[in-house]
Amino acid sequence: MPRVIEEPAPRRPAYFWWLLANALALCFAVMSWTVCLHVFGSPEVPRNYEILRKIGRLPELKRYTVLEVPNGNLLDPRGLYSRFFPLNADQLGRFNTRLMRNYLTNFERPLALTYIEGDYQVEQVRELGPDDFITQGFAIRARALVKPDDFTKPAPYPVVIEYLFPTTETHAAREFRPGDVLSVGKSPNCAAIIHIERLVDDEDPLVCLTVVPIAYGPYRVGDDITFGIEPPSEVRPGAKFPLFEPNHP
């Protein structure tokens, strides 16, 4: 009985494996490039920031002077309230992401850069620690004061700021006491908003703004006291905001 000899299956041509290897390499390259763009382009994401820290590529915050700071909007307490209080939760989330990215990338695209101005009465002062956005320095919580008209004394306004001072001279926090009035202007303070929250404090709806001065050097308190503020070498994008607990009723 004759044997049936099966013909071997045709072998794939050599160029098939060459094309497959190149296609896989291309996919890997595109994926790697996309991941790199995401990590380096979004340092405000805590996971990305940690990756950049581990590979030694953290964004370096520029040491601006008063004359070098990028142009931005300048708003007083009334303008701050009317601009930010109407934003809903989703809008605030997107806006805060943009603010943090702008700060960490030295305001390469300063479309959302906003400086504050006005008078703010100090309510609380505390040193910053390892769980805060800036880990060395101190923070001041202060309530805006606004004159209802030219003939009335300034009254509390529903805008609160958390003013962060990045400094190694933390003893300077003792120079700010509850009841003191902190006068903030574009020059020389250059206090830029990095986070916005809406709070309920003693039954009143408030806009709470976390601000950081981006013009560095000596900061003067009164006529005789100065201390130095410098850009932090590292921050914690995943830190909790606001830094001070609101006064719930």
Image: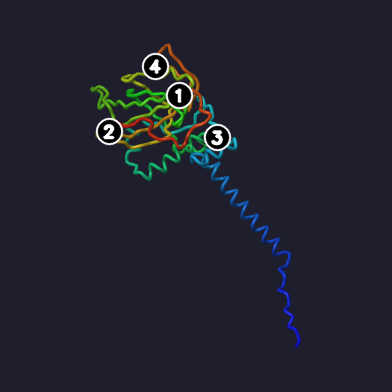
Separation of residues labelled 3 and 2 (CA atoms)? 37 Å
Q: How is the image coloured?
A: rainbow
Disc marking residue 59: 3
Identify the residue at the far right of this view: 2
Please state which amino acid type lies under the numbered disc 3: Pro
Left or right: 178, with 38 as reference point: left
Left or right: 187, with 142 as reference point: right
Q: Earlier in the sequence, mark 4 or mark 1?
A: 1
Q: Earlier in the sequence, mark 4 or mark 2?
A: 4
Q: Nearer the viewer, mark 4 or mark 2?
A: 2
Disc marking residue 82: none
Q: Earlier in the sequence, mark 1 or mark 3?
A: 3
Separation of residues labelled 4 and 1 (CA atoms)? 13 Å
Disc marking residue 175: 4
Q: Quadrant of residue 151?
A: top left
Q: Nearer the viewer, mark 1 or mark 3?
A: 1
Confirm whether residue 83 shows in the render: no
Residue under numbered circle 2: 248
Disc 4 crowd rating (10 Å Cα; few below 14, some 14-19, many 20+) is few
The local secondary structure at tag 4 comes to helix
Disc 3 crowd rating (10 Å Cα; few below 14, some 14-19, many 20+) is some
Q: Position of residue 98 (x, y in %)?
A: 45, 40
Q: Position of residue 108 (x, y in %)?
A: 52, 37
